[in-house]
Image (spheres, rainbow, N blue to C red):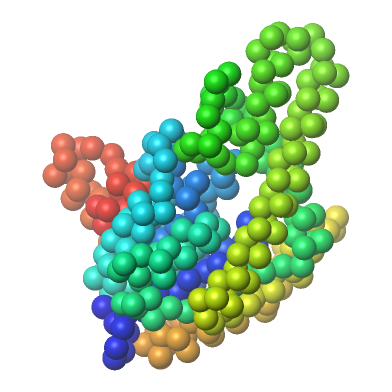
Amino acid sequence: MAFGAGKGKVVVVMGATATGKSKLAVDLALRCGGEVVNSDKIQAHDGLDVLTNKVTSEECRGVPHHLIGGVSPGADYTASDFCRDAARAVVAIHARGRVPIIAGGSNRYLDALLDGEPAALRKRYECCFLWVDAGLPVLDRYIRDRVDCMLEQGLVDEVRPFFQPDADYSRGIRRAIGVPEMDTYFRVEATGEMDDDNELRTRQLSAAVDEIKANTCRLARRQRQKIRRLRGISRWSLRRLDVTRVLMLKTSEAKDPETERAAWEADVAGPAERAVATFLGGNRGKMTDGHRDEDKAGLAEWCGLQLEKAAVAHGGRVFRGMEAAAMV
């Protein structure tokens, strides 16, 4: 469905890891009546929710998300697989009269979807590109803090079942930063040497965590470089949104949630909302606070009814991940 004359419209949220792409996608979905299509190839797999920083049910705030989970942890999820699934999701979202919001950090897969496939999305849809960016020193600091938070949330126990002495870290979800870096720790742990040696355990874990932080910072740099290349080569018109001030507040010792929220609205969510409103051509003119809760409640109720109907039709079966998204 097109909002106005011509092609249908798609919003694309890009950015390096840890810049707040998922949060912005949810904010925009609530404000413009959208659904989120994940473009992070690792998050398409089942498992490792903490390590891969998948959005929680609370963070989704009732917004339907597509292509999060549903792929076996050991399976390869190729760019062609993603293009097929993402294109289907976009068509389905448009058929419901809603706005597809593609968000994630796998820029090569996104490039393939938009420009690289025979049925490239940009041939059929107009796109609004939003780039969430931050100064590298601040982003590095926030990444390090986020890895520490992942440890507190159970990263080690979550990754442990994925350790195998002969594991192939080039396939499936084991490619995720944090899995290969923990390999030495788990190998030493398997020998029993750590059982009565807390100093050794602490030293091995510290080395693994330092490697996770360093590799994640390197990933952020590669992602930023890729976005800059795409902007030049593919003639993508990107609206840059600077999240630096928000991340500085998040990493400061004096936490102030209200100030953080105000900075997010002023620097990121507000400018993004205005850009999307202009892009949609006034057809989403009710992008105001007064309509968000109403839209959220109605959408959640509608999705719930669809899943309930699907469960009845399939003998009471529970659907989750991409399977659940397909049902609605």
Residue 111 in sight in this render: yes
Q: Nearer the viewer, residue 150 or 86?
A: 86
Residue 58 in sight in this render: no
Residue 248 sits in quarter: bottom right
Q: Is residue 285 above or below residue 258?
A: below
Which residue extends farthest left? 313
Residue at the image point whose x is 60% and y is 64% from the top: 226
Q: Is residue 67 left or right of residue 133?
A: left
Residue 246 sits in quarter: bottom right
| Residue 35 position within the rendered picture, expressed as x and y whole percent measured from the top left | 39, 65
Label tally:
0
| Residue 309 position within the rendered picture, expressed as x and y whole percent measured from the top left | 18, 50
| Residue 211 position within the rendered picture, expressed as x and y whole percent measured from the top left | 75, 39
Q: Is residue 284 above or below residue 223?
A: below
Q: Nearer the viewer, residue 95 or 76?
A: 76
Q: Nearer the viewer, residue 109 or 51?
A: 109
- The quarter of the image holding the N terminus is bottom left
Q: Is residue 172 above or below residue 310?
A: above
| Residue 119 position within the rendered picture, expressed as x and y whole percent measured from the top left | 30, 69
- The quarter of the image holding the C terminus is bottom left
Residue at the image point whose x is 77% and y is 55% from the top: 140
Residue at the image point whose x is 19% and y is 48% from the top: 310
Residue at the image point whose x is 47% and y is 38% from the top: 172
Residue 4 sits in quarter: bottom left
Q: Is residue 145 above or below residue 1?
A: above
Q: Is residue 217 left or right of residue 272?
A: right
